Image (tube, rainbow, N blue to C red):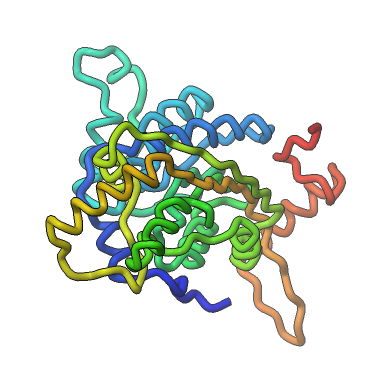
Amino acid sequence: MAHSSPPSVDPLAALRWKNRPAAASAWLHEEVARRMQERLDWIKFQPQNWLHWEPLNGGMQAHALLTQRYPGATSALIETNGARARHVERAVTPPWWQAQRWLHSRPQVLGQVTRPAQMLWANMSLHMSHQPQTLLQQWHQALVVDGFLMFSCLGPDSLKELRVLYQAMGWPAPSHEFTDMHDWGDMLIGEGFAEPVMDMERITLTFESPQRVLQELRGLGRNLHVGRFQALRGRRWHSQLLEVIEKNAMQLTFEVVYGHAFKPAPRLTVQGQSQISLDQMRAALKLGKAMGAAPASTHPGLDQSD
């Protein structure tokens, strides 16, 4: 499977978004993270170590919820941007006068994954990547065998009111196109994940002013569309935008896609002459023991009671 950029995403714009300075998480991202955290009730497996991917974008309040859910587990926060990593470091460091600063070890804030974990949590980042398949591959490599991925992103119905408005005004699209959840499921399988489970919901936000609409959108992302208007807009256009938003787009729809999938043991292919690594052999032996204790059709970490 070729790891190319989605056709509507400008790679340079996506990189600028990824490297932007930021000091806080968007409200909607925190809300989506809270809802995704509730979906962990479906998974019986309790990870002993887990990774939080780009936590400042995904939600620092969510990190506290996950820490409460897995109190005995160790965690690491992966933040590649140095400025945002410093904000994350301050957020997870208790003040010197609080007892837990000395009683509990702080989670690590790292620029890259140094050790694979049993769970990787990635909230609201996949739809802003110009190489989503490469990102899924990174997540796959960051997990141990039988570890699982939990992620969320925006789906194609997001900002449909704004798209209709821009089209009626004859303006370029207000955002790049978002990927359907079924396509995400196919990509997960293509990158080596197993048993992907996808679902979605629509969240409608109502705003008190057009200025508040634009403020929220700036916190959520940027227009990464290759055909976006790339010059500077004038005051007249900005006034016109506020006017048409007030008349037509004071409510915005966000389609939120949720997904989780497991990392299976690697498959060993037998040819005339085959070479396998020691890690592959160990994984295969572990898988054989596990299959001797439980039916192969049922993953030990997934609650199938519902």
Q: Is residue 203 visible?
A: yes
Along the viewing direction, whichever of 243 and 100 lies nearer the viewer = 243
As drawn, which residue projects farthest toward the bottom? 272
In the image, residue 104 sits, relative to residue 199, either above or below, namely above
Which quadrant is home to the N terminus? bottom right
Q: Quadrant of residue 64?
A: top left
Q: Position of residue 59 (x, y in %)?
A: 38, 37
Q: Position of residue 3 (x, y in %)?
A: 49, 74
Q: Is residue 130 left or right of residue 99?
A: right
Along the viewing direction, whichever of 252 and 131 lies nearer the viewer = 252
Which quadrant is home to the C terminus? top right
Q: Is residue 260 left or right of residue 117?
A: right
Q: Quadrant of residue 305?
A: top right
Q: Position of residue 256 (x, y in %)?
A: 53, 45
Q: Is residue 249 left or right of residue 289?
A: left
In the image, residue 17 sits, relative to residue 60, either above or below, namely below
Along the viewing direction, whichever of 62 and 106 lies nearer the viewer = 62
Image point (42%, 71%), residue name = 8
Q: Position of residue 70 (x, y in %)?
A: 52, 27
Image point (32%, 16%), residue name = 100
Q: Is residue 77 visible?
A: no
Q: How many marks?
A: 0
Q: Quadrant of residue 216?
A: top left
